[in-house]
Image (cartoon, helix red, strand yellow):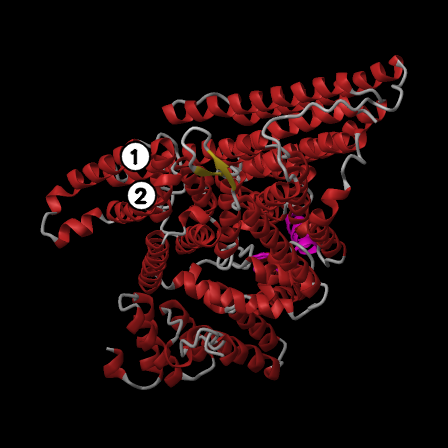
Amino acid sequence: MDRLTARLSSRLLAYALPFLYLLTSIAFYLHTYDSAQVKITLVQMGGMVLIGFWYVRLLCDFRHEWDRYAVVAAPLLACLASGILAFTHSAYQGGGLEESFRRVFYVHFALIALREFSTVERLRRLIFYLLIAVAVSSLYGLIQYLDIFFFPAPQAGLDPFVWRQAFGTKIFSTFGNPNFFGNFLVILTPITLALMLKRNTDRFGSIILFMIASGAASIFLWHTNDFMSMVKMESWSTTAFILVLCATSMFAVIRFSFLGLLFFLITFCVVVTESKGSWIGFTASVLSFLMLVFFYFSQFQSEVLRKRILRSALLFLLVAVVGVGLASRRRATSVRFRIATWVSTFEMARWHPIWGNGIGSFRILYPAVRRVQIFHIEGKHNTETDHAENEYWEVLQDEGIIGFGLFLWMIATFSLLGMRALRRFTEGLSIRDPVSGKVKLSQDQRSFYMLGTLAAFWGMLMHNLMDVSLRFVSSGIFLWLLAGLIGAMAVHDPMPTEEIEEAEPDTAAPHPAVLLYAGRAMAVVVFGYLTWLVLTQFHDAQGPSGSGGGEKLLWFLAWVSVLATLAGFWYMLVRVGLSLRHVYGHLLLIAVMAWPIKHFWGYFMADVHHNRGIFFSKQGKWVEALDNYSKVVSLNRNYIMAYYFMGNVYTDRWGAGDVDKAMNEYRRVWAIAPNYVQTHHQAGLVYLKKGQGERQLADTLRGQGRMAEAAIALKQAEDSWNQSLFYFKKYHAIDPVFEPNYARAAWVHMQLAEFAHMKGDSAGELLHQSTAEEMYKESLYAWKCRAPENDVLKERWDATHRHFNGEMFENLGNVRFVRGNFLGSLRAYRMSLWVAPDNVRVLKNLASVQVRAGRQNEAQ
């Protein structure tokens, strides 16, 4: 046993885990394709560092009181095992690998919190770091809203960064998305309230009134213009906004100090995210806080306070119901989107109900069952739906009934642990003052930490009934941390206030010095190389500091964060490395951490190169684009989008050999994700263009009198166009809304009809022409959208929904004209002009049809 190193590692982990959560919450970076990639990289690389040092801690003192953690850790380990098992039987493991990694990290964070946060001092430190994170993010959220309110784009404003007002009037702070920011605030809401209560136990009624006032002020600030318009004082909107903001902030500081201001900022930011899921989660957190106080805190059991608590809970619930209801009626698309997604997710879950389809498989399999409403809601066809918008449905489809049951077991276990521990913590100890003789209650400060943590746990779980924040690292890391903290407070009972130095001696003799020096040297060499790699490549990713103030600030903050993180890592490595008495510890650190750190850093740089590849693609610099995309897939072979974009580059460049190269890239996509966005349509387009080239070659050869060669070229064109129809049909199966897919497939059928005519195959000619006409009609009259199986929202699209498009009607008229159906062509052209009256080309066609039909006056 090496208990000295175990204690040192434990102490360092108690600092490192809070720092990782702080940095993950406030970090933001734009030199990558995905602005959230920096958070992912921090969790991946930082997570491996924490896991490595924690395993060293266990190796040095594995048997120390492990039995007392086993029962509490069992649900966490079961969820970890379920995720790993679900990954092993997934049909497309590449696409689910990152999601599997996250489960590993999240559960380890919970286990570290469960075992290592054994004192009130450590618990207080972690919560303090979380308060810093929410203070930074909410202050920046306020700045973003002030920027929106006073300096609407395109004029310059308070927000110095290039992503300002990226979501219009919604704020997103350091999270890149209003929903993720809202979920983070939901978690910190009850924790902040619990700390306010801890400091103001004699003013709980004032806290309740302040909660209500903060909510009312936030709603007023959100719609100041509307409220002032109601009283015919629109010109005073700016003044009213400033007065209410300053007055509420000053009152919060004077009455409740820093925590009061923080709660007001949290409430305001939750409101102006305009995220209905965040409003529901916020309400659930506040209600959980109030109900736990109502049932467990005996000092607030007076009849007056109990009535205030219940009335406040009902008021918050009523405001949330009205607010969410009004917002849903005004913008029902998010509700429609979720319902359509949930229906499809349930269908996916039924494919493998016991074991599930595999963790992370949702985005891979979902395109096969996606409802047509999603295409209309998004207005796009080249986007993915990565998650189910409901954590419980996604766990069910990922891991089946068994994994879903284990997830519910974990929730129930830590909920019961928290409630039982809270009952113990709030029993209180009666102490008689020796001077006054009065009896006072001595409160366990853990009761307030458990109050905030348990309410945050429930609030986040409620929020994730209609959101997927658990699947993203910015907020997903918190559920498992909250579970670990609940378990830690329940297990470490009594919990010492400060660190206790154990006097137990080390029982095993140290290894010879030469082995220890060799182990230290290996660790220095390996991690020194990784540090050099990170610094040099990050320097390449950063580039110069930029010209604008925001760019310089972001550049500076990025370098400070990287250097501070590396310094912290080396401090831990040196301290633990010098303390280790056995070389096994050095080898364990290298084995657990070195390759994964390099691998995950490669993921970060892959995202950087992907961003550069897009930049060069837009400029038509194909060589530079392909070079960067190649680096992407060499660093992350499961980066689906890079393969897809490489295929598109070859299609756009269209040089010698690019047909095969493009198709090779699309096949690499299908090996990971068989129905990825528009790959099937792009593959059909490749063969369409190939057939066009071969047809042109045939015409050229025929003009030169080389008939045999022309016939070969025509046969190649026919084969290419048949191949294009194969892929257009595959795309149609997953997206029956995309109009260009119909138009291009119909055009190919008309070319094949011409080939059939050339060969004297009248039946084949008629079949292709008829198919082309049917495709135009299917697109125009939305046959798939109007099918009964797609009416999941009961919108009666069979009576109201059409895809009328002037150009598609024109094409339909052209097909009918070729087929000699002049009356049908006439109707199609008229419909085209009804949709697009100024189309001169259709007017000319219509005149020609009138002439053919013998209607000279109408033609004139």
The numbered mark at residue 206 is 2
Label located before the other in sequence (1 or 2): 2
At which x and y percent is residue 569?
65, 23
Residue type at tag 1: Arg
Residue type at tag 2: Ser
Task: Examine the rendering and report whether any part of residue 33 can be seen.
Answer: yes
Mark 2 Cα shell of 10 Å, populated few (<14), some (14-19), many (≥20): few
Answer with the quarter of the image where residue 856 lies. bottom left
Instruction: Look at mark 1 in the image and give the residue it sits on.
Output: 255
At which x and y percent is residue 226?
19, 52
Which contiguous range is marked in magenta?
Answer: 657-682
**In the image: residue 114, left or right of residue 853:** right
Residue at mark 1 to residue at mark 2: CA–CA distance: 9 Å
Q: Is residue 179 above or below residue 13?
A: below
Q: Are marks 1 and 2 in contact (CB under 8 Å)?
A: yes
Mark 1 Cα shell of 10 Å, populated few (<14), some (14-19), many (≥20): some
Residue at image point 62% right, 67% down = 348
Residue at image point 25% right, 81% down = 858
Q: Is residue 668 magenta?
A: yes
Placement of the N terminus among the 4 image quadrants: top right
